[in-house]
Image: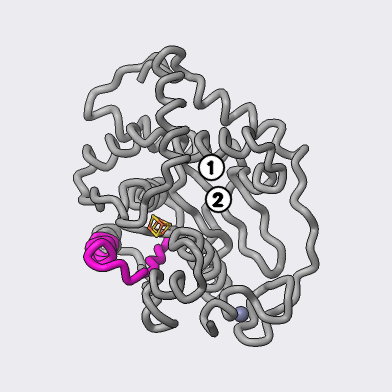
Amino acid sequence: MPQHKLSLCRDCYPSWFLKQVKNTILKYKMFDKDERILVAVSGGKDSLSLWDALVKLGYNADGVHIYLGIKEYSDISLELSKKMSERLNKMLHIVDINELSNPISKIAKKNRRPVCSICGFVRRYILNKIALEKGYTCVATGHNLDDETAILLSNVLRWNVELLARQKPVLQKDDKLVKKVKPLCRLTEKEIKTYASISGFDFVEQKCPYSTNSTVNFLKEILNRIEEKSPGTKIQFYQKFVKVADVFKIKEEKLNYCQICGQPTTANICTFCRLLKS
Ligand code: SF4
Ligand code: ZN
């Protein structure tokens, strides 16, 4: 790991990885040992490694899997999420989108919107709802350093101040929105994949068939090339952003409760209920 000027063997690597996760949680004051954490588990290497690491570090972490109804990709994702729940002996909440409405692709088609934009929105809605209903203090997601720096670069290139304000490793809660945290934000995809492989658990290797976000992938490629020439650039780019991130303010909007589902919204009826209605 040239960015850390460090080489480790298989035996020492997992404890180094866990220490990195713990330091990130402490550095950004994400949560304490007495909090109930809900991990958004997709079945991929990031979310499964996160869940495994939090439990090994002694945090009280359950999982939630949202079954999106994307053919065999969703079936494998669900199966591997269940396997991890058994391995960790922790509760996995499962939300089947088919029971609420239709597969995600059908909702997108009906609303004439890209599948990923509907998917991202629906997942954020469900995570917040389940966490509030079941009494969790925060939702932890498996965003890694490669995701965060690519999105950061995209937001900076457009100076999208609103999105920059939302890109911090901790988004504090208010009474209607649960706290959101990203404990893997300082670890690269490669470091996480190495942890998953050494730990010996299976994760979904295939990509979601709708995963065509070429802009983010293109920015990841560029950042990888910069990182190769100048190791440590990604982590510095991200950490220095976090230090100054408070200058970007989230636009204050008055939140009401949706008249149908009771979830927070700026309108009378929330976007989720409007999507399902159409
Ligand atoms: Fe959802 Fe798009 Fe990700 Fe697939 S690639 S899981 S549709 S956001
Ligand atoms: Zn609603």
Inter-mark Cα distance, 2 to 1? 9 Å
Tell me which label, 2 or 1, sits earlier in the chain.
1
Q: Specify the quadrant of the image occupied by residue 192.
A: top left
Disc 2 crowd, CA 10 A, few/some/many (<14, 14-19, 20+): many
Measured from the top left, where is residue 267 in percent x and y? Answer: 73, 75
Measured from the top left, where is residue 85 in percent x and y? Answer: 29, 63
Residue at left 40%, top 74%? 106
Q: Secondary structure at mark 2?
A: strand
Q: Is residue 44 above or below residue 230?
A: below
Question: In this rendering, does residue 157 appear at all?
Answer: yes
Q: Is residue 258 above or below residue 248?
A: below
Measured from the top left, where is residue 260 in percent x and y? Answer: 63, 87
Residue at left 31%, top 51%? 44
Relative side of 39 to 30, left or right: left
Q: Which residue is mark 1?
A: 25
Q: Quadrant of the N terminus?
A: top left
Measured from the top left, where is residue 5 in percent x and y? Answer: 40, 14
What residue span does the magenta drawing correspond to? 61-83
Instruction: Tell us which disc is closer to us: 2 or 1.
Output: 2
Q: Quadrant of ligand 1?
A: bottom left
Q: Does the magenta-highlighted stretch encompass residue 80? A: yes
- Disc 2 residue type (three-letter): Val
Residue 181: mark in rendering = 2
Residue at left 67%, top 73%? 264
Q: Secondary structure at mark 1?
A: helix
- Please report contact status of discs 2 and 1: CB closer than 8 Å, yes or no: yes
Relative side of 7 to 187, left or right: left
